[in-house]
Image: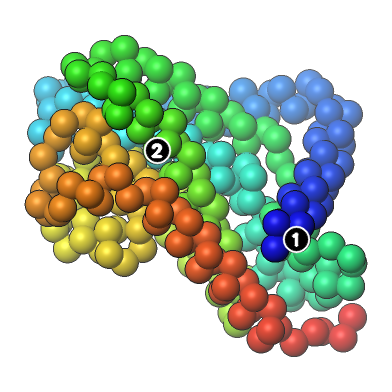
């Protein structure tokens, strides 16, 4: 199993490196598209800033606390999108018959799809989120104990892993319904947008669904409650605030299982 994972990562790396070399052939275009990516994502944060121009708190959270949620969500979804976001093209490849060519190559199809048309310019979003995160951390009134300090990088790593799993799991739906990428996007990019705001501004049913249904709350909501010392609107056991690594591992395992089921159900186009 470790050997197969290592080979898959190597295939992803070689495929992604090929697309990076292609992008670097036009450095000025790459730089402009990356800067444009940063500017577009910054507009989302400006909307939040405008909100706090008219209010001191949002659902009981101040500006720096909401900025922390925005930054951690943006980093996780942005990095996951850069690493495996191309997998949402699966339906198009199935429709055109080009997915068959990946299946006959001596390399994992999942690694090939994840790195297909790898776009390094998408790094703009996690870079912008990192800058907002550093700014928010400088203004938080938090007692930085060792567990809170360690939870910040753990939150970013586990949040990225959860979004990667959601990208892969959502793409599997396209094995049965081609060109259904928007279904996947509603849970990935839609979920990322939801996590930019405090859980207290949403209904209890929606927050519960993000905990016990699609585990978006483990990306940043629950860990942030511990880091920031905020009350839990659902009054859940405090142990769940530390469960992000376990949830990330489980979601990755489920995503891998769904991918295998999708491959078994796939019927070649004969091309």
**Position of 262 relative to 77 (above/below):** below
Task: Place residue 120 in its image quadrant.
Answer: top right
Label ID, residue 4: 1
* Inter-mark Cα distance, 1 to 2: 27 Å
Q: Residue at x 52, y 60 (%)?
A: 252
* Residue at image mark 2: 155
Task: Place residue 201 in its image quadrant.
Answer: top left
Quadrant of image for the N terminus: bottom right
Task: Place residue 213 in its image quadrant.
Answer: bottom left
What is the crowding at mark 2: few (fewer than 14 residues within 10 Å), some, or many (at least 20)? many
For this rendering, which residue is in front, 192 or 218?
218
Quadrant of image for the C terminus: bottom right
Relative image position of residue 83 (x, y in whole percent): 64, 45
Secondary-structure class at tag 2: helix
What is the crowding at mark 1: few (fewer than 14 residues within 10 Å), some, or many (at least 20)? few
Q: Residue at x 67, y 70 (%)?
A: 91
For this rendering, which residue is in front, 101 or 251?
251
Residue 35 appears in the figure: yes
Q: Residue at x 71, y 22 (%)?
A: 31
Q: Is residue 250 left or right of 18 when viewed as pictured?
A: left
Q: Is residue 132 left or right of 94 when viewed as pictured?
A: left
Q: Decide which of tag 1 and tag 2 comes sooner along the chain.
A: 1
């Amino acid at each position: 199993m470790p050997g197969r994972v290592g080979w898959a990562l190597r295939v992803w790396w070689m495929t992604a490196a090929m697309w990076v070399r292609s992008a670097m052939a036009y450095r000025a275009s790459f730089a402009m598209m990356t800067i444009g990516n940063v500017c577009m994502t910054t507009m989302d944060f400006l909307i939040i800033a405008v909100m706090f121009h008219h209010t001191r708190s949002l659902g009981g959270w101040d500006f720096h606390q909401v900025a922390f949620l925005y930054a951690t969500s943006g980093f996780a979804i942005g990095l996951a999108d850069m690493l495996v976001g191309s997998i949402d093209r699966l339906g198009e490849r199935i429709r055109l018959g080009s997915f068959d060519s990946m299946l006959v190559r001596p390399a994992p199809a999942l690694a090939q799809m994840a790195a297909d048309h790898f776009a390094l310019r998408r790094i703009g979003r996690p870079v912008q989120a990192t800058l907002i995160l550093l700014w928010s951390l400088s203004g938080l009134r938090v007692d930085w104990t060792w567990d809170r300090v360690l939870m910040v990088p753990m939150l970013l790593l586990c949040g990225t892993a959860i979004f990667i799993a959601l990208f892969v799991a959502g793409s599997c739906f396209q094995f049965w319904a081609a060109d259904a990428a928007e279904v996947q996007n509603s849970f990935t990019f839609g979920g990322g947008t939801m996590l930019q705001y405090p859980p207290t501004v949403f209904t209890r049913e929606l927050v519960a669904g993000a905990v016990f249904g699609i585990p978006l709350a483990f990306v940043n909501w629950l860990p942030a409650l511990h880091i920031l010392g905020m009350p839990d609107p659902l009054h859940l056991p405090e142990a769940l605030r530390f469960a992000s690594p376990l949830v990330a591992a489980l979601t990755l395992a489920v995503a891998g299982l769904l991918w295998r089921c999708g491959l078994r159900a796939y019927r070649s186009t004969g091309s």
